[in-house]
Amino acid sequence: HPFGIGGWASTYLSVCGLLAGAFCVMVRLREDKTSTTRGYGNASCVVSWLCAIVVVYGRYGVAGVGVVGTTRVAGIPASVVGTVLCAPILLLLEGEGSGSVSRKKYQASSTKSKKKGLVLSTLTGSNWFAPLLAGTVAVFLACSFYAIFLRGCGIDFSLIFGTGEVIKSQEDVFSHVYGSSRRTTGAGALDDVATMARKSVVHTRTMVAAAKLSGSGIWTSSNLLGPLMHILGLVSTLPSLQYLVRHSWSTRPAPPAVKVMLSLPLNLLAMSIGRGIPSLIAAATTGLVGGIMQLASTPQQ
């Protein structure tokens, strides 16, 4: 598999991510910087983070279906854990407001030049965690959207890397579990999973994950109730996540406590009806915890 251990895709993206990260660190450690050099460093940071995210989801997928080996860490899907572990890469981003006083003269001399790269004028020392939060939320929402609307439509990102295993029906989702040789993609049977009776616990968990994931997508579900419930769950997470991300980037006061409080139950709704997609549960949990923290930090009147 291209994203397996030693696969060409994971190796290539890992090397690209490390090189981009090293360039970002070199730019960050420079004593004298302009908006252009800082912008190039930020762009390299985002590239490094994106490479890491692609490797994680290319290896473990949205729910770990079809992956031989460990797909959970302490009961949490490996893709969710990997997303959280990759997020600190975004802490290397640098805003225009950072820097010491001794550099102001050097920076002022280049203000008339055209800015290039990823220039973050609103990123300061007070909202340093905002890119980490925004990036993590964006990945969770994008994966949830993919699982509901795109997975199983016949177009799969694995075609880019030459795997050829495109999921086109509900049977294709379960073929990873049962080792069925009847796949519309022509892929061979995955006997490594289906025939290992001594690892029945892993097989059962994979079967449950495949069943939940199959019922969440509009192309793989046997009826529309499951996808509609997951769409409702995805929409329910947006108010809290919007308040959380906007407040983390902005220096303005937190949104009214009433709005935050009214949006919290929506996350509980998403967690109860969107169990088929781990990234949707993670997004709802982020919104719930973030909303509670916002309420705790809001001054009492």
Image (tube, grey):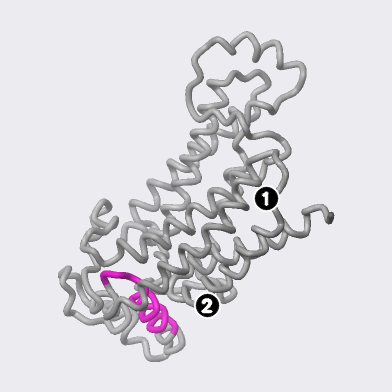
- Judging by the rendered image, the residue that carries numbered circle 1 is 255
Check disc 2 and give the amino acid type: Ser
Tags 2 and 1 in contact by the CB under 8 Å rule? no
Give the x, y percent position of residue 129. Answer: 66, 45
Callout 1 crowding tier (Cα within 10 Å): few <14, some 14–19, many ≥20: some
Q: Which residue corresponds to the image point at 71% horizontal and 57% vertical from the top-left?
A: 257
Considering the numbered disc 1 on the image, is that residue within a helix, a strand or a loop?
Answer: loop
Name the foreground residue: 153 vs 43: 153
In which quadrant will I find the C terminus?
bottom right
Q: Residue furthest right?
A: 301
Q: Measured along the vertical axis of the image, is residue 19 above or below residue 230? A: above
Asked if the magenta segment contains residue 257, the reply would be no
Q: Magenta includes 211?
A: yes
The residue that disc 2 covers is 272
Give coordinates of residue 251: x percent, y percent.
Answer: 70, 38
* Residue 295 position in % (x across, y down): 74, 59
From the viewer's perspective, is 223 left or right of 266?
A: left
Q: Which image quadrant for residue 112?
A: top right
CA separation, marks 2 and 1? 26 Å
- Which span of residues is magenta-colored? 205-219
Nearer to us: label 2 or label 1: 1
N-term mark: 2 or 1: 1
Give neighbour class at mark 2: few <14, some 14-19, many 20+ (Cα, 10 Å): some
Which of the 4 quarters of the picture holds residue 92?
top right
Q: Residue at x 35, y 78 (%)?
A: 225
10 sits to left or right of 116: left
Question: Mostly what secondary structure, the magenta segment?
Answer: helix
219 left or right, relative to 296 = left
The amino acid at mark 1 is Pro
Image quarter of residue 99: top right
